[in-house]
């Protein structure tokens, strides 16, 4: 691969690691394999990432940008656009995974392996999304727009629909019907959820 500048080398290592972790798990992947896939030596790998844990943290920072999901949804929330809020969350999550499912697979592996950074990922990323949706639902309940339900359970229920759909398609390889677009899938989930929670 030749000599790469520091930041470019880090990027190549992260990409190779995420691919290997998503195929073999965190425990099943060696630093030697990551170095080979990156086109560098283990010594070079360790110059950039002292441990696999450090590399895992770098992957989360590089690949999991919860703000990209929350920003458009927060804009809709400011206008109390219920459908817009849930559509923004679902569409962003769906499109991210459909474009690249390796992160989803890596996160599943790390949770199943009991990796120490899995709860850190949940606390720093997933919890933010739960809290945002829960807070929005709570506000809309107070407005009289939504039924009096447990906001956190409702938020997790909505996210659960999206995650289950992604697991079917990306893990079990159940293909989406060819006449159904990601936008139509999202509209179905949003309609079901919003119609069910409205007063």
Image (cartoon, grey):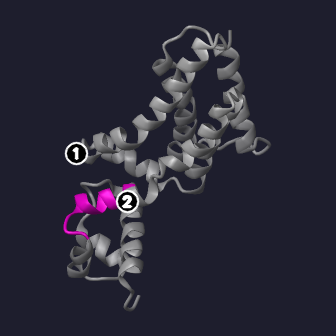
- Label disc, if present, on residue 54 of the rendered structure: none
Q: Residue at x 41, y 72 (%)?
A: 11
Q: Residue furthest bottom?
A: 2
Residue for badge 1: 116
- Label disc, if present, on residue 59 of the rendered structure: 2
Quarter occupied by the N terminus? bottom left
56 part of magenta stretch: yes
Query: In the rendered view, does 181 fall on the left or right side of 22?
Result: right
Give the image location of residue 42, x and y in percent.
Answer: 22, 78
Q: Residue at x 26, y 57 (%)?
A: 28
Majority secondary structure of magenta residues = helix
- Can the viewer see residue 117? yes
Q: Residue at x 34, y 56 (%)?
A: 24
Assign a secondary structure to mark 1: loop
The magenta segment? 49-60
Query: Alpha carbon of mark 1 to alpha carbon of mark 2: how far?
Result: 15 Å
Give the image location of residue 122, x and y in percent.
Answer: 36, 39
Position of 94 relative to 21 (above/below): above
């Amino acid at each position: 691969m030749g000599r790469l500048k520091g930041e470019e080398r880090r990027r190549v290592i992260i990409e190779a690691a995420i691919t290997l972790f998503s195929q073999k798990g965190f425990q099943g992947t060696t630093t030697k394999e990551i170095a080979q896939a990156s086109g560098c030596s283990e010594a070079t790998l360790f110059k950039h990432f002292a441990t696999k844990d450090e590399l895992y943290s770098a992957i989360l920072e590089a690949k999991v940008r919860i703000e990209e999901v929350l920003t458009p949804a927060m804009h809709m929330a400011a206008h109390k656009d219920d459908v817009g809020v849930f559509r923004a969350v679902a569409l962003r999550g769906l499109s991210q995974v459909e474009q690249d499912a390796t992160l989803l697979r890596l996160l599943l592996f790390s949770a199943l392996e009991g990796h120490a950074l899995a709860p850190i990922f949940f606390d720093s990323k997933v919890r933010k999304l739960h809290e945002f949706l829960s807070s929005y639902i709570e506000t809309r309940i107070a407005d009289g727009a939504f039924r009096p339900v447990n906001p956190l359970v409702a938020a997790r229920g909505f996210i659960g629909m999206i995650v289950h759909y992604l697991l079917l398609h990306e893990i079990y390889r159940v293909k989406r019907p060819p006449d159904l677009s990601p936008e139509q899938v999202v509209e179905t989930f949003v309609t079901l959820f919003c119609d069910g929670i409205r007063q």
